[in-house]
Amino acid sequence: MNKKESTSFEIDTDLKKTVLKILVSASNRLDSETASFISDPSDAETVHKMRLEIRKMRSLSSFIKKIAKSGCYNSINGRLKLLNKSLAAIRDLDILVLNCRQYNKSGRLTSIMSTERTVLSNRLRKEMSNPDRGQKMLPIDWPAAIEWDNQAIHETTTSDYVKKELIVMLKRYLKLGKNTDFSVPNQLHKFRIAGKKIKNIMELFLPILDIKEQKLYRRLKKLLQLIGDIHDFTASRCILTELSKKDSGLSDEANELARYFKKIEKKKAKCLHADWHRAENTIKSVL
């Protein structure tokens, strides 16, 4: 495919303007989705969209550390990380509820997980509705929050900075891939997080990427989707295992479903090495 993919706005050659435009846009969308969540915390899609915007901001705020003076990143990232942690727990239950509806015939597990999900989402809504608590999470005034290294900014353009930093990230990712045992959940999770940071940056700056780089973006997106599927079933199994320990009456049912999820995990994992090998070769072609 030779046609370039595009984002919703043009990328400015001025790095500072471009970064702020992306961050403010993501922050505004997060504010909008947050309002929707507070109004109706039961909607799974809202939670998912909130996490997407948080990922963009966390990835980009990390990406610009070389042109932003120390201090702003840690405080902002801490606030976003706090919110994302709560949303991740809700998202894991959303996925488990969907899986239970599909694979648990009795419906008992679906009911229990749905109730647990409601408890978590209502708790987060209460926290975010509290002026003191919510203010610590949102909103973020990005123009005021970032202290720029003006000399570093003036010495580069958006395209030059993105290309240079992507090369650094890709080289590290290749090294990480060689040292990652995909059968070890913690190592696979670390590999996934590093890949998502690269994917997020490539997605934000697609208009200035060349054909090979856009091909890599699509390869990486496919790889991370597979790893994400494996992660989801692993998370579902962990929740079910904990449930079986707490409620002996549901132990057999929960363990049976957990074993079935393990089979699905193994089936998906068989494709992992091949997908990574293709992505690895594409990374090398870009470098």
Image (tube, rainbow, N blue to C red):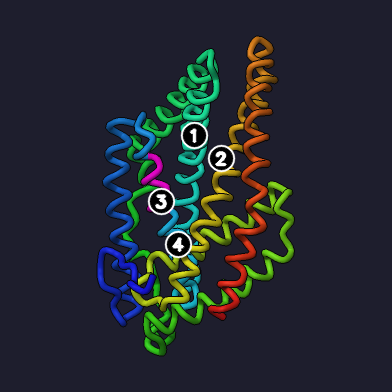
Does label 2 or label 4 sit earlier along the sequence?
4
Q: Residues within 10 Å of mark 4 (few under 14, many from 20)?
A: many
State the residue at coordinates (45%, 51%): 80
Residue 100 lies in the magenta stretch: no
Does label 3 or label 1 sit earlier along the sequence?
3
Q: Main secondary structure of the magenta part?
A: helix
Does label 1 or label 4 sit earlier along the sequence?
1
Residue marked by disc 1: 95
State the residue at coordinates (46%, 27%): 117
- Image check: 127 left or right of 181? left
Residue kind at label 1, given as amino acid type: Ile
In whole angstroms, how far apart are the C-alphas of marks 1 and 4? 22 Å
Residue ranking furthest to the bottom: 155
Where on the picture, by quarter, is residue 57? bottom left
Looking at the image, is mark 3 or mark 2 nearer the viewer? 2
Residue kind at label 4, given as amino acid type: Asn
Residue kind at label 3, given as amino acid type: Leu
Q: Quadrant of the N terminus?
A: bottom left
Magenta residues (range) = 47-54
Looking at the image, is mark 3 or mark 1 nearer the viewer? 1
Q: Which numbered disc covers residue 200?
A: 4
Residue marked by disc 3: 52
Note whether 74 is above or below 228 in the view shown: below
Secondary structure beneath disc 3? helix
Q: Which numbered disc covers residue 232?
A: 2
Q: Quadrant of the C terminus?
A: bottom right
Closer to us: 181 or 84: 181
Secondary structure beneath disc 2? helix
In whole angstroms, how far apart are the C-alphas of marks 2 and 1? 7 Å
Cβ–Cβ under 8 Å for marks 4 and 3: no
